Image: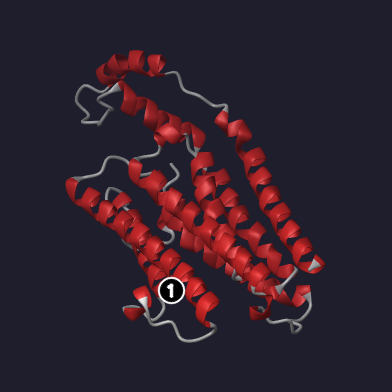
Amino acid sequence: SVMQALRAILLCFTFSLCGAFSHGFFKDLRGVSTPSTNIGRSLPALKSAFPKTGVALPLTRKSATTRTSLNMMIAPDSVLPAMALACLFPTLLGLWKSEYTVSYGYGLSMAFSGFVTFASVPFESLNFVAQAQALCYILYGLRLSAYLMYREIRIPDLFRRESKGSPVARLPTILGCSLLYLLMAAPLRLASQAGAYTPVSQAVAYTGLFLMYAGWAVAAFGDYQKTYYKAKNGNGLVTEGVFAFLRHPNYTGEQAMYAGSLLCSIAAGFGTASALPGAALAPWAASA
């Protein structure tokens, strides 16, 4: 119908607007660069300045460039607002329809948090764990949002149409959800600031990545299989495929993904004083 088409156009416009904002917010940061040659030439002077203090210095020009670029590109007063906006803007879709707070708002908040991680730190400065972790957030958020849009357009009767109160009355719920999404994205921050991994922490991080991508795949396959089954057999109970082992594969996969993300953040924080106590708050304290 015309209303469904207008709704799809408006959602696409919202996606583009949020993406354009993220690009504009960080475009000045992308222009910052650190010449590796100057750093390499300064290493002998730094080593001679600390002959007996035991200060650990980068052993290679590449590692020096990476760490210096990271410290220059990430400012404590810009990362938290950027991540907060990435989680707030999509959630404001709940002002239009209340269920969008926990549907498109949730999916896009996770995707934009992954984009912010890539946009606020030079790609070469991100370790493999941080890159893979941020990419999983992006894939999860975009897939979920695309699936929800498909379901709303093709199966509109699934969405309730009764009134949910005025937009102003929804604001507390919207703001509360955006804060929750920010905390769910917090592990990305700590992983992006991680230094060298020990063999143990690397094993923990890789285990976390495995859980993340396995959970993402289980959730995606569960949604696809349920949609395919119901299109052929109506609204009967799905008991085949992955549903023969998991009653709610999308929720189980989601829990596995966030458990893996937590493992990645704990592994990244092994070398910091704020690693284990308060894992959700540690990412914002790791900006220095």
Q: Nearer the viewer, residue 241 or 116?
A: 241
Residue 7 percent across, percent down from the top left: 75, 64
Q: Residue 168 appears in which quarter of the rendering?
A: bottom right
The percent position of residue 133, horizontal first and vertical second, equals 40, 51
Q: Locate the N terminus by quadrant.
A: bottom right
Q: How many marks can you see?
A: 1
Residue position marked by numbered label 1 in the rendering: 251
Residue that sits furthest to the right in the current view? 2
In the picture, measured across the screen, residue 4 lies left or right of residue 127, that is right
Is the residue 81 above or below the residue 251 in the image? above
Residue 250 location, x and y as percent? 44, 71
Q: Is residue 5 above or below residue 196?
A: below
- Residue 49 position, x and y percent, is 28, 19
Pick the front one: 118 or 10: 10
> Image point 28% across, 52% down: which residue?
205
Q: Nearer the viewer, residue 269 or 10?
A: 10
- As drawn, is 215 to the left or to the right of 102? left
Q: Is residue 278 visible?
A: no
The answer to which of 256 and 6 lies nearer the viewer is 6
